[in-house]
Structures are given as C-alpha cells and as structure tokens.
Image (tube, grey):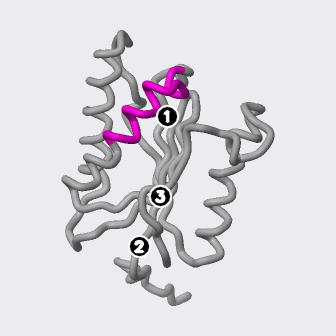
Amino acid sequence: MHKHLRRLEQVWLQPQIYLVTICTTQRRRLLATQTMAGEIVTALQDASERTGWRVGRYAVMPDHVHFFCSPVIEDAELSEFVGLWKRWTTRLAWGLGHEGRLWQPEFFDHLLRSDESYAEKQEYVAQNPVRAGLCETPEQWPYQGEMVALEM
C-alpha cells in the first residue's frame, strides 16, 4: 500500500502573481485599435482599484488580453476582478458600435511560482505580437505597458 502525500490546500507565496489571459468571443479581432485598447486599459485600472488588485504588465492583442496581477487585500477574488472588468469593457465596446458578447465566458489564469517563471511569462507576453507577425520587436507594439511594477 502506497502512502500519498497530501496536496497543499493553499500555497503561501508573498506576493501571489497571476498571469491572466482573456479571449474575445469567437476570437474576433477587434481589440487592437487606439480607442478600444485605451478603453480596455482604463477599465483595467478602474477595476483593479475597486476590487483590491494591482496590475503589472499587460498586452492587448487583436483577439485577447494578457495581464499580470497581484492581490492587494487578502480576500480579493480574481473572478470578481475579471468579471467586473469584462462587464465594463463589454459596455464600452457596445458604445463603440460592437454588438453581442465581447468576451468568452471563461478566462485563463496561471499562478506564478518563482522569479524565473515570472521572467519567462513576461517575455512570452512581450513576444506575443512579434510571434503573431504584428511587429518586429516587442517595443514596437503600441498596445502594451505596465501599470505598476510587480515583484515576487
């Protein structure tokens, strides 16, 4: 008979940093415009302030958004933060003439476990527009930036 180690119920890393990816419905390519990307980033800042999350680096791609975030308060819920942001950005998109759902119902989150993992994921996000053929270097992509510096 094998003894199995119990799985940890929680991981105490201070601070916790998540990489969040949210895709548009049917991967519609409508996010990478000056107006839409600006609204997305403004709503991200507003939602983070209202729900207890700090947002670090972000990239707005034509059909999805990546951002790194970390809770400021202990009981901050990632799903509450993302849900609020998705509702706000959907209303903003409707105001710009888009119809129907803006986002897929689910989102993807990845809890970073080390400085190395964080650096790798930041590089992955930075290179995303280059891999997609949208620019030659990450610095050329106009729809990305950093709200606050997150550190592990």
x and y percent of residue 48 in the render?
29, 53
Q: Residues within 10 Å of mark 1 (few under 14, many from 20)?
A: many
Label 1: element kind? strand
- Labelled disc at residue 23: 1
Comparing 102 with 137, the one in front is 137
120 part of magenta stretch: no
Identify the residue shown where x is 71% and y is 47%.
138
Identify the residue shown where x is 75% and y is 41%.
130
Looking at the image, do the residues carrying marks 2 and 1 touch, with CB atoms under 8 Å apart?
no
> Which residue is the site of mark 2?
16
Identify the residue shown where x is 70% and y is 41%.
140
The answer to whether 139 appears left or right of 84 in the picture is right
Amino acid type, label 2: Gln
- Labelled disc at residue 68: 3
- Labelled disc at residue 138: none
x and y percent of residue 8 in the render?
40, 81
Q: Of tags 3 and 1, which is closer to the observer?
A: 3
Magenta region: 30-43
> Is residue 84 positioned above or below 105 on the image?
below
Amino acid type, label 3: Phe
> Is residue 130 positioned above or below 99 on the image?
below
Label 2: element kind? loop
Q: Residues within 10 Å of mark 3 (few under 14, many from 20)?
A: many
Q: Is the stretch drawn in magenta largely helix, strand or loop? A: helix
Q: Of tags 2 and 3, which is closer to the observer?
A: 3
Residue 36: image quadrant is top left
Residue 107: image quadrant is top left
First reached walking from the N terminus: tag 2 or tag 3:
2
x and y percent of residue 72 in the render?
28, 69
> Is residue 25 positioned above or below 23 on the image?
above
Looking at the image, do the residues carrying marks 3 and 1 touch, with CB atoms under 8 Å apart?
no
The answer to whether 61 appears left or right of 99 in the picture is right
